[in-house]
Image: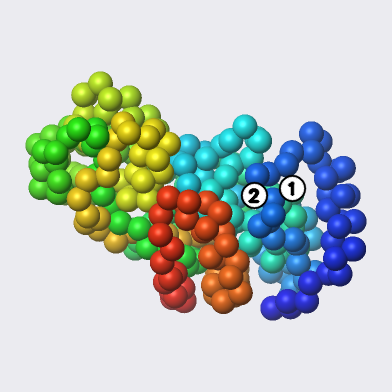
Amino acid sequence: MKRSRLPLIALAAAGALALSACAGGTTTPGDDAAPEPEDVSFEEGTTMAELNEAGTITIGTKFDQPLFGLMGPSGVPEGFDVEIGKIIASELGISEDNIEWVETVSANREPFIENGQVDIVIATYTINDERKEVVSFAGPYYMAGQSILVLADNDDITTEDDLVGQPVCSVTGSTPAAMLEEIGAEPVLTDTYSNCLEPLRNGTVVAVSTDNVILAGLAAQNEGEFKVAGEPFTEEPYGIGLALDDTDFRMWINDVLEESYEDGRYEEAWNSTAGTVLPFVDPPAPDRY
Ligand code: GLU
């Protein structure tokens, strides 16, 4: 991969052009850390070449998950997954203003990739064998684990065993929903995790269960109301979903991830988003299956 960066003046000019070309000229909080587009070229016929030529990429992410992907007043989502998307776009020579962000919820991630509605999905997306039958995954770039969110004054629920026979909110098409079924809880399913908060407040469910980092974001967003109970009880390796047979693109994204681990961009992306609430941990090595 070519790593030479454009001279600063050229970058500033390109940035000004990109801004003036962008109707509404949105600005993104955390712009300081925003990666500038790379001066790159790719082998003809690859997805990287196609995206680079198009000058734009469509990325599916969550819009309601604080710390990872949350639509803010700026009109563009913010969070760690969003920052990872910006790093990938930058390496394709695409500025962050030219990323088209599409909301993907847990249940539509595979179909959106399969139908070509998005180029990639970066959305707290667990890599597993079932999903690998229909899409492929670069990464993992983060290791989460399923956990439990309860009302702040609830000391009765501390492990997954306490969920057996109890109504617990999660999301259709997610790995935690399947796990709740497996452990004998009574899953109450909706389409996004933020929709689980009202049922938790009004006692329709006793807990919300999904990845620890998602729950930490929801707890931080609603300070004092909720708490994360116990320890994570599954492993949820987060991957970047893409078309099933696009091995070149998958391997290239793995290269980009590894490079961002080495040059500090990954850690910077973490620190400016999820790192405001959660500790930094060294990222896992990509699985080049
Ligand atoms: N990581 C889990 C999954 O991919 C839960 C989080 C989510 O639904 O986005 O199913």
Among the 4 quarters of the image, the one containing residue 125: bottom left
- Lower position in the chain sequence, tag 1 or tag 2: 2
Would residue 131 appear left or right of 42 to someone viewing this image?
left
Q: Position of residue 122 (x, y in %)?
A: 52, 53
Residue 97 is marked as 1
- Asked whether, in this view, residue 12 is left or right of residue 224, the answer is right
Residue 115 showing in the rendered view: no
Disc 2 under 8 Å from ligand 1? The reply is: no
- Judging depth in this view, the residue of 245 and 129 nearest the camera is 129
For the residue labelled by badge 1, is the local secondary structure a helix, a strand or a loop?
helix
The amino acid type, in three-letter code, at marker 2 is Gly
Q: Which x, y percent locates residue 89?
A: 67, 59
Task: Look at 37% across and 35% down and name the residue there.
Answer: 223
Residue topped by disc 2? 30
- Density class for disc 1 (Cα within 10 Å; few <14, some 14-19, many ≥20) is some
Q: CA distance from mark 1 to mark 2?
A: 13 Å
